[in-house]
Image: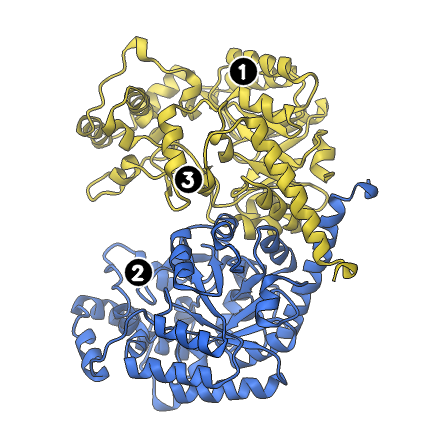
Chain colours: A blue, B yellow
Amino acid sequence: MRTAFTELVGVEHPLAGFNRTPAVVAEVSRAGALGVLGATMYSPEELDEQLTWIEEQLGGRPYGVDLMVPASTTQQDLNTLVTDLRSQIPDDHRRFVDGLLEKYDIPPVSENDALDRLGRIDASLETNMDTAIVSELLDVAFSHRIALVANALGTPPPAMLERAKAQGVPVAALVGKREHAEKQLAAGVDLIVAQGTEAGGHTGNVATMVLTPEVVEIAGDVPVLAAGGIASGPQLAAALALGAAGGWAGSVWLSSHEDAASQVIKEKLLEATSSDTVVSTTRTGKSARQLRSAWTDEWQAPGAPSPLPMPLQSMLVREAWERIDVTAEKGSGPARELESFFVGQVVGSFRGLRSTAEIVQDIVEVCEARLAELGRLVEPVQR
Amino acid sequence: MRTAFTELVGVEHPLAGFNRTPAVVAEVSRAGALGVLGATMYSPEELDEQLTWIEEQLGGRPYGVDLMVPASTTQQDLNTLVTDLRSQIPDDHRRFVDGLLEKYDIPPVSENDALDRLGRIDASLETNMDTAIVSELLDVAFSHRIALVANALGTPPPAMLERAKAQGVPVAALVGKREHAEKQLAAGVDLIVAQGTEAGGHTGNVATMVLTPEVVEIAGDVPVLAAGGIASGPQLAAALALGAAGGWAGSVWLSSHEDAASQVIKEKLLEATSSDTVVSTTRTGKSARQLRSAWTDEWQAPGAPSPLPMPLQSMLVREAWERIDVTAEKGSGPARELESFFVGQVVGSFRGLRSTAEIVQDIVEVCEARLAELGRLVEPVQR
């Protein structure tokens, strides 16, 4: 299947696979789609290591990277910034989180228990507000042979766009509303990912079925990928039917062997139906779809405080989540009740863990068969 | 395009058009799709008149009817039932609605101002709880040559299913979750309408992109229509890509000349974007997607009461809405602010009013062209 997207990044299949686990990204690209590393939690040194490792697996195949680059950064000293942000977290909020940990019997984490960084969700926006660090992350990304750079958070700053243009690397931007797409197109991005409300993680209110064609309509020659609800061949075929140049899949890789999510999280995801997700601001301060759990329920109970804005909320809950993850992994029932992860409504389609390669192959083969069937629906000779 | 749906009901195009305006229903069917009359607000006599009128327009073409038949009805005297229900509406709620009408300067309606019934939303569930009336409505429907009967509210009662089966009329049911589809299939319905959260009116949380394939997966030989987000050719093509046997479109007809909505409502819909709808229980007591307006905002303001369950909420607000509709039609600005209507996220795609026939033709032609393009994506000779 050749589309404007496959031409833009040089892949075989019109599918991008977004994940924070380097092994998933490598396998997606090896299977002929475009693996995109969600790299929002890495230091520049770590990013360099991961991209180097990915390239070693790929034998020249293309892959991409997704960074969290805010439109504006601060030159303020990072320690001062973090101290200042911390002081803005109300005591009531701290007490609420402490109370939750006590109620669910979640002990502090010892040094030995510290999780592999990949096992965690860590939207450390405060680090990414530092001009020097953001600049280093971009240095690292552009020192590798990336085929796409995406910005996880709003319009990419001009410096990022200029640099990408100079190096011939296409820039992608995620949007949840037509108005956002207009801004991104005006800024000069090369690929729009139109993300519907059914997607996992940070998401808006408009569904993929509605958002995709309205973004396609204004995008002109700029290719659009549909995100949200893309986890199978029929859904990729639907994305193409809506006028997208392909699909951007995120959640489906959580059902892969390679994904770094813990066994407990994977078990909970396999048990979930499509009705078991919820949009909540309790993890990062911005609306994000995730598995509904005792955590999201507790924040909605009477008397619970309103979640704080980004980045304060993630600073408030980060340690709590490390404790929950570690305790759940050790087999604690109450910690398992709290356990959750960013995931879209496609979670209801997970039937078991498969290899990343098998997932890509299944999506592509079923999509191709479906497209052939659709073509036959309008061939008069077949009647 | 021949699908299991076109075969089931004997139409040319895999598209059903749901509307409460008989003229829209007739035009949809005349254009080769299946018009389905939303008949939840008619008395048996009115229903008989409307169906007779529709058939006169159709020259034998098929059409359908959508009734609101509760799983159980009451033999209690209707007046006693209504009096009993009225007594359950708290005074606080009445005062809130009265206060709203006063704040927005909405006078009572005089006899002369009474709106055409078609111009109103009237989910008069309390009438439909009466065994005798429901039985009469079914008598009327089955005395006409309907090609489909749908139930707007949950699983059709066994009496309705048996009667339809005896007369060879296929029964359709709307579902918003896979679990609901399981129940409907077990009850023996002939067609499932899988309605995603982006749809107007009563709706669930799961998006069409996710819901359709999961309902198709369990439906076996029973055809599935995708509803929610279906207002254009690419969206109908996407429905088919997802495995549906066609699309069920509701909102798009609000942008037709024939639809009975007032000029004010149509103007507001033409101005709206896909982000301007909201799911609210303030109209019927059940979650329903509608245009966001001062009405839905006021019910979310601090101090507003929680909406009542169905049918109490619609009994509480029905007269208020008649007053708002009449006053808005007379040109009142504040009434226009309150004005709203059930509509899906596709409202953002309305560019102007068109004839119903033109809308059907456009959807079908663009869909067919898109399907042909999709087929070519996987034809090796085209490379």
Q: Is residue A292 visible?
A: no
Q: Which of the 4 image quarters holds residue A307?
A: bottom left
**CA distance separating discs 1 and 3:** 26 Å
Q: Which mark is residue B47?
A: 1
What residue does disc 3 label? B289
Which residue does the image show at 58% across and 30% down from the upper left?
Answer: B358
Camera-nearest residue between A191 and A258:
A191
Label 1 marks a residue whose chain is B
Residue B248: x and y in percent read 58, 37
Whether marks 2 and 1 lie on the same chain: no
As helix, strand or loop, the secondary structure at mark 3 comes to strand
Q: Is residue B104 above or below residue A127?
A: above
Would residue A365 appear left or right of B303 to someone viewing this image?
right
Q: Chain of mark 2?
A: A
Q: Earlier in the sequence, mark 1 or mark 3?
A: 1
- Quarter of the view holding residue B35: top right
Q: Which residue is found at the position 31% from the left and 23% from the top?
A: B86
Please provide percent x and percent y for residue A212: 51, 52
Q: Secondary structure at mark 1?
A: helix
